[in-house]
Image (cartoon, rainbow, N blue to C red):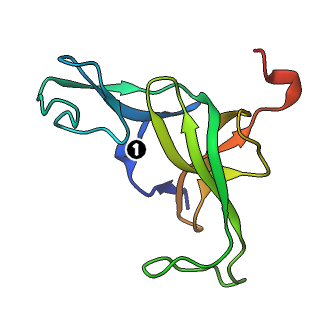
Amino acid sequence: MDSVAVDETLFAQLDPPLLSGSGCAECGVVVFPAAQRCPGCAGVDVVRQALPGRGTVWTWTRQSFAPKPPFEAPASGFEPFVVGYVDLGSVLVESRIVGEVAIGDQVELCLLDVSDTEFTFAFEKVSPDRVAS
């Protein structure tokens, strides 16, 4: 069985993965996830837009204890994971981050399986040989 996104409105496209945000035509504020009304000026002239697939780690922390319900730990048990904010230029996105990172590292969007049937988004560090590309 093919897996599906936990929420298909999160994505502008899947190959390569890009998140779907919205930009306000009145004041220029960009948000993620996409919104029908601008949180900056309350304007309704917002347009869905694909967000960049690469960004910079703005800050991060390690989630060392299982979150409260409705989170369900896998059958193998809870394992700590990295979460943080990724600066995509026009918007900060809160996200899981795969692997170890430092503030300022370049990261790129990837798909993260959350079960056998669903996936979500995460970011992972760009390998050193691909940082400039």
Q: Give the vertical position of 57 relative to 22 (above or below).
A: below
Tell which of 42 and 74 is nearer to you: 42
* Front in this rendered view, residue 117 or 89: 89
Instruction: Using residue 51 as the reference point, say whether residue 74 is left or right of it.
Output: right
Quarter of the N terminus within the rendering: bottom right
Splitting the image into 4 quarters, where does residue 82 fall?
bottom right
Name the residue: 75% across, 15% down.
133
Say which residue appears at 79% left-offset and 22% top-offset.
131
Q: Residue at x 12, y 28 (%)?
A: 43
Q: Position of residue 81 (x, y in %)?
A: 69, 63
Quarter residue 104 falls in: top right
The percent position of residue 97, horizontal first and vertical second, equals 66, 50
On screen, 76 above or below 42? below
Q: Quadrant of residue 55?
A: top right
In the picture shown, does residue 100 fall above or below 27?
A: below
Q: How many marks?
A: 1
Query: Which percent across, then down, holds residue 84?
Result: 59, 50
Residue wearing tag 1:
10
Residue nearest the observer in this picture, 9 or 61: 61
Task: Tell me residue 30's x, y (percent).
Answer: 34, 28
Kind of residue at disc 1: Leu
